[in-house]
Image (cartoon, grey):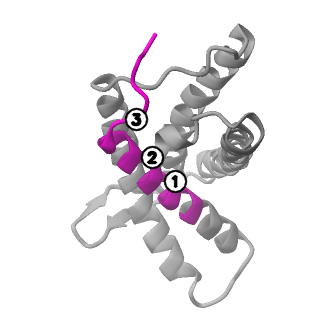
Amino acid sequence: MSNTQKFSLSMRLFHWAMAALIISMLAAGLLMVRSLEPWQLTILTVHKAFGVVAAVLVIARLVNRFFHQIPALPNDLSNLQKFVAQAAHWLLYLLLFAMPISGYLMQYFAARPADVFGWFRLPAALNVDIQTYALFRELHGWLALALVALVALHIAAALHHHFIRKDNVLKSML
């Protein structure tokens, strides 16, 4: 059981930076698949670059998490509620890692290299493999929907703790 009342500064910075990045990435992804506007290619290029950033950040965030204590959940939560909360957090980490991997593999099999802000390029297949591309495109879409649902649940739970239960769960991340 942890006796710390707040997440460390580094954990809070990772949390809020990734929250802004992930919400932006999900919004951009939804815009891209719904539009054929001239700006779509620009957003796709930026989306891919920030996808690489997200993959690096989630790894750094996981490493950081192992070096810091996290506040305990309220004592009056049932064991089932605590298990669901912890499982949801680990599922968020899994999705945050799987999203950029599936996105990269989708681009790889489309024979499209991923340019990362002009700093470097992730390689692409020499030839298009349309079936494997389609598989990873579909997977990327389903993972995005799962992530949207889990982020919504995460936000709802934080608001429930703050406004209904009036405990310190949300405050520990502010």
| Residue type for callout 1 | Ala
> In this picture, is 78 found above or below 15?
above
Question: Within 10 Å of the Cα at label 3, are there few (<14), some (14-19), or many (20+) other Cα atoms?
Answer: some
| Residue type for callout 2 | His
Instruction: Please provide the residue range marked out in magenta.
Output: 1-24
Of residues 165 and 54, the one drawn nearer to the viewer in this rendering? 165
Q: Which residue is mark 2?
A: 15
Of residues 135 and 165, the one drawn nearer to the viewer in this rendering? 165
Of callouts 3 and 2, the N-terminal one: 3
Q: Which residue is mark 1?
A: 19
Can residue 125 be seen at all in this image of the molecule?
no
Are the residues tagged 3 and 2 within 8 Å (C-beta)? yes
How would you classify the magenta stretch by its main secondary structure?
Answer: helix
Give the structural element (helix, strand or loop) at label 1: helix
Image quadrant in which you'd find residue 35: bottom right
Q: Which residue is mark 3?
A: 7
| Residue type for callout 3 | Phe
Residue 12 % position (x, y):
40, 45
Of callouts 3 and 1, the N-terminal one: 3
Are the residues tagged 1 and 2 within 8 Å (C-beta)? yes
Q: Residue furthest right?
A: 164
Are the residues tagged 3 and 1 within 8 Å (C-beta)? no
